[in-house]
Image (cartoon, coloured by chain):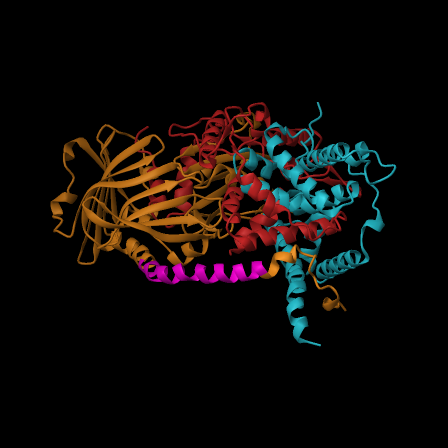
Chain colours: A red, B orange, C cyan
């Protein structure tokens, strides 16, 4: 069992795992009992520390529930922008793989909408954008307008952290939990070819399979 | 002191099933080990053939036509490579669009462009030769990627070994390689994003190897219509960047700095560049550039990322009380990873 | 206009995975909440087996209703509501009153049920105390950076990003410190099980 999977598990506890990481984890979770046990113990510790550990520590319903769920249909995202908003569509499909394929398409399409095209050789790339990310982008803007002072609260009162400029971008203005703040990205100030070329110089000799060649290909022949 | 006997942990950690689970774990472990033994031999082969790959391009003689695609952009090129008396000769010809060739003869490098073209071409010359573009540091690669041999195939009428290089973390891309079994040369590679979509492809469509590569293949045709520019090695200047005052807070696991403080900086960046760093994990790399920007209006804010094949360029602005900066990341990483790194770049306090 | 970061449900990602067709994600949610749901139900329905059936039914209902879960509330609030309703229906069908006198079910929905010590058998209480002791002593033995990271996370509820600011280190380091802290605690917890076996041999 890899440390990576355990670390992903730990990140997932805190809602800090990346989407693809979670998918990978879930694929492993099904047939790795040690991963399941680890998850259970992590949860137990977290519950104890949170003061709400039930005294029912011997509960183990998951097997029976999993067996029953096995007979239930899988869900699929049908159209729509966000899985959480698709509640109305009660479309059920029996195949998990179909669902995954659909969600990937959805991500690609949605990612494409957000991609600002500049330069010539731009292709859309799957972007795991979601609403919370968009909103937290706005948060950051808000933070900046506040003169770079971000306030966050926790269960033990209020703390103020002052910082300058976009440094505040790393601070969540959420009041108690886990909002991810993304940087306010801007259009590169120069022709992107210049950056590509400089990058190629910086890393002239790294990569197999032609990543380095890709960098040399960045040296455009035509104008 | 804890008295563990008193606990008899039974109900504690869902443990009713623990002894059964422990047994199952042992079984899984034993079963799990078996295929590893079976795989061990082929793994050695894979590692060896990967190590052979970079040498193969440098030390063999070959003449081939290949395509390189990045997204919808596809380039066709011909490469002729020869080693004679220990001297490497290489000719790389762009077969599409305007004429552009690079001819290397040992240390000498010439660039061939149409006679009618004007202006400098130095900046269009890539920093390394084609043959040097396939360097692999397998031990480093193995730290960050699972390298596995998929299955054997025929490609370009050759027996090939198909190798997958899958990252151990999902913050970067993956590769599939098709390597000639006999020579180790890379015949095809496909770079995929984290969802498995193809971003870049390198693929020979014809390749002559082994036979003699005559010298005339390195001679420039239609000289009267060509402008040949000799590129001297000393023409590129190295600049020392201070590389202080900024800190990259987060980089993906396995990446390390690959750049000395003394770097070759394109003239465009001179004067404005405050900080520059490059990192690699043995397969992919990225650079971070911090530039001081006079004019804030040039920034158009919003969500911007420019992507060429697997390479993303993304900038973010930064303002301290005195100046405006643009922090740019360029590298072969997923947009999400780029954003995360970019967000972690901060000005060091006390500077 | 005031911008406020959306409150992100810690279970959001797993919920999304279920909604995208991944049943194992639901299994993870079950493992996460089974003891808490069980404890809740047990307070309403005293009989252990009955409570178990109800908890199980609640999870199945939650699974079926998940496409309609819109994230307006946290997943666990929503799940508890389902559990309470399931228990309520069960009691109504049997013509019985909830086990806890003076506690309205609506109150139960917000998980504000007072802890009734008498439900806990002394052995269970002991187990729980021991568990707490092991966990806290494991935390106390952690190196400072790990201790700070896990404390900020578990007690203060800060995000990795916030912890990285507080501790002045990269987010990746926060993630790894928290992980290492959890592993260190986990190691101690696992010893509890190993303790069982060695105890049989040692005096």
> Considering the image in quadrants, where does the C terminus of chain C appear?
bottom right
Q: Nearer the viewer, residue B41 or A209?
A: B41
> Considering the image in quadrants, where does the N terminus of chain C appear?
top right
Q: Is residue B241 above or below residue C134?
A: above
**Residue B54 coordinates in the image, percent (x, y):** 30, 53
**Residue B67 coordinates in the image, percent (x, y):** 26, 37
Residue at the extreme front: C94
Q: Main secondary structure of the magenta part?
A: helix
Magenta stretch contains residue C12: no
Magenta extent: B20-45
Q: Nearer the viewer, residue A18 or B217?
A: A18
Residue at the extreme bottom: C203
**Residue C171 coordinates in the image, percent (x, y):** 61, 46
**Residue B336 coordinates in the image, percent (x, y):** 52, 38
Residue at the extreme right: C102
Q: Is residue C107 left or right of residue B183?
A: right
Q: Is residue A223 left or right of residue C129?
A: left
Can the viewer see residue B344 in this picture?
no
Can the viewer see residue A164 in this picture?
yes
């Amino acid at each position: 069992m890899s440390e990576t999977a355990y670390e992903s598990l730990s990140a997932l506890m805190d809602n800090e795992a990346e989407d693809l990481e979670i998918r990978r984890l879930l694929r492993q979770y099904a047939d790795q009992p040690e991963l399941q046990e680890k998850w259970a113990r992590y949860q137990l510790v977290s519950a104890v520390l949170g003061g709400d550990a039930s005294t029912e520590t011997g509960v183990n319903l998951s097997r029976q529930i999993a067996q029953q769920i096995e007979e239930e249909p899988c869900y699929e995202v049908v159209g729509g922008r966000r899985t959480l908003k698709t509640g109305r569509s009660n479309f059920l499909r029996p195949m998990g793989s179909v669902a995954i394929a659909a969600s990937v398409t959805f991500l690609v399409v949605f990612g494409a909408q957000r991609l600002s095209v500049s330069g010539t050789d731009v292709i859309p790339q799957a972007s795991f954008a979601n609403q919370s990310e968009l909103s937290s982008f706005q948060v950051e803007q808000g933070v900046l307008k506040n003169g770079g002072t971000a306030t966050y609260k926790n269960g033990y009162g209020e703390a103020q952290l002052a910082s300058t400029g976009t440094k505040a971008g790393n601070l969540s203005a959420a009041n108690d939990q886990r909002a991810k703040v993304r940087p306010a990205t801007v259009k590169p100030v120069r022709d992107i070819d210049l950056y590509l070329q400089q990058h190629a110089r910086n890393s002239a000799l790294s990569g197999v399979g032609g990543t380095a060649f890709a960098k040399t290909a960045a040296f455009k022949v035509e104008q | 002191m804890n008295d563990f006997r008193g606990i008899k942990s039974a109900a504690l950690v869902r443990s009713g099933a623990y002894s059964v689970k422990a047994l199952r774990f042992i079984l899984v472990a034993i079963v799990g080990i078996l295929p590893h033994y079976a795989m061990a031999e082929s793994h050695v082969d894979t590692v060896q053939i990967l190590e052979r790959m970079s040498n193969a391009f440098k030390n063999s003689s070959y003449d081939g036509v290949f395509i390189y695609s990045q997204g919808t952009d596809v380039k066709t090129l011909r490469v002729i490579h020869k080693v004679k008396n220990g001297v490497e000769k290489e000719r790389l010809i762009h077969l599409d669009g305007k004429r552009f060739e690079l001819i290397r003869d040992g240390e000498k490098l010439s660039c061939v462009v149409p006679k009618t073209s004007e202006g400098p071409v130095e900046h269009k010359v890539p920093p390394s030769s084609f043959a040097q573009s396939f360097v692999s540091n397998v031990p480093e690669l193995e730290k960050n990627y699972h390298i596995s041999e998929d299955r054997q195939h025929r490609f370009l009428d050759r027996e090939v070994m198909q190798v997958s290089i899958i990252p151990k973390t999902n913050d970067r891309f993956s590769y599939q390689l098709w390597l000639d079994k006999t020579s180790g040369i890379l015949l095809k590679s496909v770079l995929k994003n984290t969802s498995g979509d193809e971003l870049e492809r390198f693929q020979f469509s014809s390749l002559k190897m082994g036979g003699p590569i005559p010298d005339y293949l390195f001679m420039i045709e239609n000289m009267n219509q060509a402008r040949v520019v000799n590129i001297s090695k000393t023409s590129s200047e190295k600049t020392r960047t201070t590389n202080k005052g900024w800190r990259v807070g987060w980089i993906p696991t396995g990446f390390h700095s690959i750049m000395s403080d003394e770097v070759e900086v394109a003239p465009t960046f001179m004067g404005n560049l405050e900080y520059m760093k490059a990192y690699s994990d043995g397969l992919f790399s990225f650079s971070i550039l911090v530039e001081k920007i006079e004019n804030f209006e040039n920034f158009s804010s919003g969500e911007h990322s420019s992507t060429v094949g697997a390479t993303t360029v993304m900038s973010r602005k930064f303002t301290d009380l005195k100046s405006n900066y643009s922090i740019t990341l360029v590298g072969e990483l997923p947009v999400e990873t780029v954003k995360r790194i970019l967000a972690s770049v901060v000005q060091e306090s006390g500077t | 206009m005031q911008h406020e970061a959306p409150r992100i449900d810690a279970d959001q990602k797993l919920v999304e995975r279920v909604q995208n067709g991944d049943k194992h994600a639901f299994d993870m949610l079950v493992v996460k909440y089974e003891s808490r749901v069980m404890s809740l139900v047990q307070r309403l329905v005293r009989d252990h087996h009955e409570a178990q059936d109800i908890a199980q039914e609640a999870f199945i209902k939650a699974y079926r209703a998940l496409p309609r879960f819109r994230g307006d509330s946290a997943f666990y609030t929503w799940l508890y509501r389902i559990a309470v309703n399931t228990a309520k229906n069960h009691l109504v069908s049997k013509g019985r009153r909830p086990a806890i006198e003076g506690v309205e079910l609506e109150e139960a929905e917000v998980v504000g049920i007072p802890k009734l010590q008498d439900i806990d058998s002394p052995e269970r209480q002991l187990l729980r105390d021991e568990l707490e002791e092991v966990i806290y002593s494991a935390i106390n033995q952690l190196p400072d950076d790990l201790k700070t990271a896990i404390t900020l996370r578990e007690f203060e509820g800060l995000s990795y990003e916030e912890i990285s600011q507080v501790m002045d280190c990269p987010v990746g380091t926060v993630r790894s410190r928290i992980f290492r802290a959890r592993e260190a605690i986990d190691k101690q917890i696992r010893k509890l099980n190993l303790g069982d076996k060695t105890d049989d041999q040692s005096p």
